[in-house]
Every structure is written in C-alpha cells, then in structure tokens.
Amino acid sequence: MENDQRPVTVVFPGPAEAAPAPRGRGAALRWIAIGLLCVMMLTLLAVLVVLPDLVADRTAPDAAPPGSAPPAAAPPAAPTPDAKRLARDKREAERLLGMALRTQTELESQGVAVWGGQDYDAVMDSLAAGDAEMQAQRYAQAGRQYEDVIAKLEALRASMAARMVAAMESGEAALGSEDGPSARASFEVALAIAPHDARAQQGMQRARVVEEVVALVAAGRAHEARDELDAAQENYAAALALDALAPTARAAHADVSARIRARDFRNAMSVALAAIDDGDFAASRAALERADTLEPGSPEVADARRRLALGVQRSRIESHRAKAQAFERDERWREASGHYADVLVIDSNAAFARTGRDKSLARARIHDELDGFLAEPQRLRDAVPRDNARRVLAAAGEVDGESEPKLAAKLERLARAVDIAETPIEVRLQSDNLTDVTVYRVGSLGRFASRDLLLPPGTYVAVGTRDGYRDVRVEFTVNIGEASTDVSVRCQEKI
C-alpha cells in the first residue's frame, strides 16, 4: 500500500466531552467504531514509522569492501496520482468523523440517547458503517457515511421541539388514562430535552403518584358504595393532595361533596321545619341559615322562611291573645284592649282581635263611668247625673256575676246609690207664722211655725217674704243618706 509521507491529523473524543453512555445496540456500535478507529490508527503509525526502515534494510546493497567507494544514492520515487487522492480522501474522512463525533457529543449532553429512539440508532448504524469503511481504507465511502451521520444528527437536533411537544402530549394523555408507566416514559423524554421545563416537571411529579391516586380513588368509591360519604371524601381529598389535577379524583371529589351537601341540606331543612312546629324559632332560624349556606337561593329555604315568619306571627298573635284574655278575666279591660290592638297591628284581618278590642273598650268605658259615680255619689243628688247613671246601668245590661264580678259589684253599688239618691229625706222647715215661705222646685208653703217635707237629696232654695221686712233667701242641701234636715226661714230685718 502506498502512503502519503505527510503527518496525518486524527480526532479522538476527549474524556472531558464524554457523553452519557448510549443505550442498547447504539452504544455497542459506538464502542466498536472507536475500537476499529484505534486499530486503524495503530496500523497507520506502523506503516509510517516501521515500514520505511524495513524497506530501506531490504533494498540496501551489500557492504562494500574496505576502501571501495559507496554506490551513488538513488533519487526518491515521486508519489503517484492515486496515492495523493487516497491521502486527500483520508484527511476529509477524518475531518468529517471529527465533526460527527463533536455533534454526537453535544446531542448526548442534551439527552439524545433518551429521546432519539430509532432515529439515533440509525445514526449509530451509519457511524459504525463509516468506521468499517475507514478500516478497509475506503476513505471516500467513509466520508460519505460520516456526512450521512452529521445530516442525521442535525435532523435530530432540529426535531427536538417537535419531540418535546409529542412527549408532553403523550405524557398528558397517559396521565388522563391513568397509565403511570407510559406517562413516566413520556415525561422522561420531555425532561431529557428540556430539564427545566416546569410543565414537564409537573407532569413527571404527577406520573410518579398515578398508582397511589388510583388506589385512593378506588378506596373512596368503596366507601361511597357503603354510603360512607365522609370517609369517601377524605380518600378523594388525599388523592387530590398528591395530584391536584387528577381528573378522576377531581370528579369523584366534586360528586361526593355535592352528595354530602345535599345530605346536610336535607338534615338542616328537617331540623328547621320540626323547630317551626315546636315553636323553637331560634333553632329553626339557625338551621335555615345552615341550609342557605349549603344551597344558596334554594326555593325550599325561601318557603321554609315564609313558614317561619308565619309561625312567628302566629306565636306573637297567640301571645297577645293569651295576655288579653288574662286581663279580661281580671276585668282589666284597658290592658286587654291594648293587646287586641297589638294583634291588629300584626294582622289587621284578625276578627277575634277586632271583636275583643271593641268589647274591651266598651267595658273599660263602663268601668270608668261607674268609678266616676261611685267616687262622687253626691253628684246623684242632681237629676242630670242621676239620668246618666241610669243610662250606664241600662247599657251594662245583665252582667254575669261569675264572669265579671267586679263589674257586677260596681253596678250593684251604683244602682243602690241611685235608689238612695231618689229616696226622699225628711226636711223640717221652721218659721214664725209671719213669713210667707216658698221652696223652689217644691212650691209656696205659706206661713207656718213648722212644716215637715219629704225631699229627694239635692240642693234647694227657700225664700221668705214679710211686709215691712227684708226678704230672706236660704239655700240648703239634702244629703244622701241623712236621716233629716232642719231649715229655718224667718224675715226679721225691718226695712
């Protein structure tokens, strides 16, 4: 084999640029290619260093005897055109190999061994084929293989963004179907391409707990089947604590939470309605507040609140009715009428309250008038007050002494007072048989020394006249209940 005598540059990947170990068949092929390259380099070194000496030894003439002149040295042969082309192809192949190895090292630092897949395996196959051509000293063919390696590596580099999108989509789809292994594999690819991508990191975190989330959801569903809703909710909440985005856990948690709210709402409504019936309005109001918190704007709560308002109204009405009736029994009619008036403020259509108020006011007026007459019985001496007293007695009618003993007693006292006021009382008029005496509202009595009259209680005026004497005027009162009254009428002052 003819060789170019100029130095040859060989590029080996240094240890500082070592990439992560390739996986599977690609890794093995790479190490094979490196081994073949080393063998080829050693062979080339032997050709360049040892072979010229061996050739020189074989072609040197026998040693000339002493004193003989050495033969003239032959001029070196000029390289042929094929040897030059071969050396040029070899240098180009080595340059392309170095570019391929540098590009490979860069992509392996970016995780191509993880995300490259079959495409990266194809690169390793092309690299191994190129190394085989180099070993066979077919440098032009080796160069073409290395060019193919470089093109494929650049294509891999250009596909990173699309592979990232595909890995994220497949990972998220696997999460949706709760396929933990597939999800982890997809996000491993995504993180190899973009280790700091927040979305990929979150996806991997979710993928690592898929099996735990599935187990917790299954436990929750078992609790739900036994109507153990609170325990189920705890399981679903624990699943969401591991993966807040887990669709199955979120749906299950929302569903059981709705069932718990519905259950608690029914319980609160039952308590509220029972409390209304029992008259415990504070408890009913509190239960309705809880129900409204669970189901805001619920028509059931609105209806129960209307029932509560009616219950409170009925309770207030019954309270006023009971107090009014108690005052009626005690014949405290003014107070009773006030409670009936309060009922009419609450419900203007309450017929019993209107009837009770009118009766109470009428009875109160009778009591007031009776109390007035009984406080000043002397007023009955006059006819007008006596007539009013008779009217009051007539208005009261017949009263049941058992139901209204106070009124009956007052009527009896007033009737007796009227009778007394109308009973004549003996009045003795004394004169001098010289004075003519006239008693207004009674008549002229003439002259007399003593005269007895029966006069009803009241105030009277007696007038005495006598010729030559000044008239006298005597006003006297016949008091109720007095046994008799003496009145003197005499004209004694001369004119």
Image (spheres, rainbow, N blue to C red):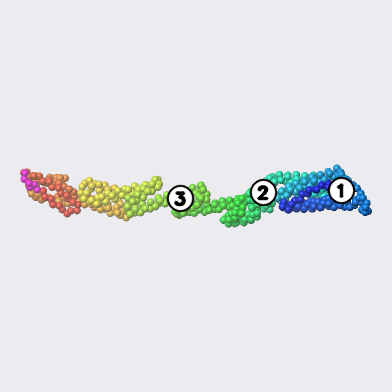
- Give the Cα distance between marks 3 and 2: 64 Å
| N-terminal-most mark, 3 or 1 | 1
- For the C terminus, the quadrant is top left
- Give the Cα distance between marks 3 and 1: 113 Å
Is 6 on the left-hand or right-hand side of 196? right
Using the rendered image of the protein, determine whether residue 170 is visible from the camera's viewpoint: no
Q: Nearer the viewer, mark 2 or mark 1?
A: 1
Is 416 on the left-hand or right-hand side of 270? left
Q: Main secondary structure of the magenta part?
A: loop
| N-terminal-most mark, 3 or 2 | 2
| N-terminal-most mark, 2 or 1 | 1
Mark number displayed over residue 308: 3
Q: Residue 120: x percent and y percent?
A: 74, 48
Local secondary structure at mark 2: loop
- The residue nearer to you, when weighing 211 against 158, is 158
Identity, as a three-letter code, of the amino acid under mark 3:
Leu
Mark number displayed over residue 194: 2
Q: Residue 337: x percent and y percent?
A: 34, 49
- The residue nearer to you, when weighing 458 against 24, is 24
Identity, as a three-letter code, of the amino acid under mark 2:
Ala
Farthest residue in the front direction?
A: 67
Is 56 on the left-hand or right-hand side of 397? right
Mark number displayed over residue 34: none
**Residue at the image position 66 percent from the left and 50 percent from the top:** 195
- The residue nearer to you, when weighing 261 against 427, is 261
Q: Residue 87: x percent and y percent?
A: 82, 45
Mark number displayed over residue 1: 1
**Residue at the image position 40 percent from the left and 47 percent from the top:** 346
Local secondary structure at mark 3: helix
Q: Is residue 30 magenta?
A: no
The magenta stretch is 490-495
